[in-house]
Image: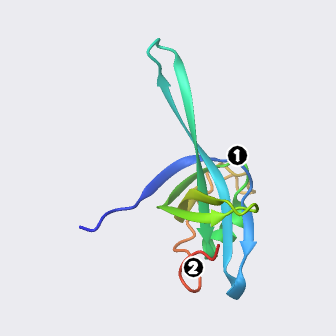
Amino acid sequence: MRGLNKVLLIGNLGKDPEIQNFDKGALLAKFPLATTETFKDKNGQRQDRTEWHNIVVWGTLAEVAQKYLRKGMMVYVEGRIQSRQYEDKEGNKKNITEIRAENFQMLERRDNAAGQGPQIVEPGAPSEVPGGDMPF
């Protein structure tokens, strides 16, 4: 066996997706996702711990994210952990760990004319970025 890199998250968007367009029509959506766990400390007091995850979505999924996702919405995300290095504006090298989403579902109840229940979007497999890896 070579290994497994799989992430499953349910959390709330920290802000609306940030959209970037690249050459050859590649579309990228980025958004922070907050997951919160609740536990009792050694004194029996309830505590909340929130982790922030950087979500990256490419192609068709990025289009769906741009159209439907909004700050505060609860979303289920499937993907894999990906780390990369970049240079900031001052020329300093920075490391970042992201979740490259391969699928997501909106878990929010949406108002619609038919008065139906939760709106679940399963956009399918994302389009791959031309040339393979992320260009930034």
Q: Could you tell which of marks 2 and 1 lies nearer the N-terminus?
A: 1
Q: Is residue 104 above or below residue 41?
A: below
Whole-number angstrom distance, CA of label 2 to CA of label 1: 26 Å
Q: Amino acid at mark 2?
A: Ser
22 left or right, relative to 100: right
Image coordinates of residue 33 in percent, x first then y, are 62, 49
Quarter of the rendering occupied by the N terminus: bottom left
Mark 1: few/some/many CA within 10 Å (<14, 14-19, 20+): some
Image coordinates of residue 34 in percent, x first then y, are 61, 44
Q: Which residue is mark 1?
A: 72
Residue at point 66% right, 48% down? 109
Residue at point 55% right, 65% down? 122
Q: Which residue is mark 2?
A: 127
Image coordinates of residue 26 in percent, x first then y, are 67, 80
Total marks drawn?
2
Q: Secondary structure at mark 2?
A: loop
The figure's colour scheme reads: rainbow
- In the image shown, does 117 or 20 lie closer to the viewer? 20
Q: Amino acid at mark 1?
A: Gly
3 left or right, relative to 55: left
Residue 3: tell me if it is visible. yes
Residue at point 67% right, 60% down? 92
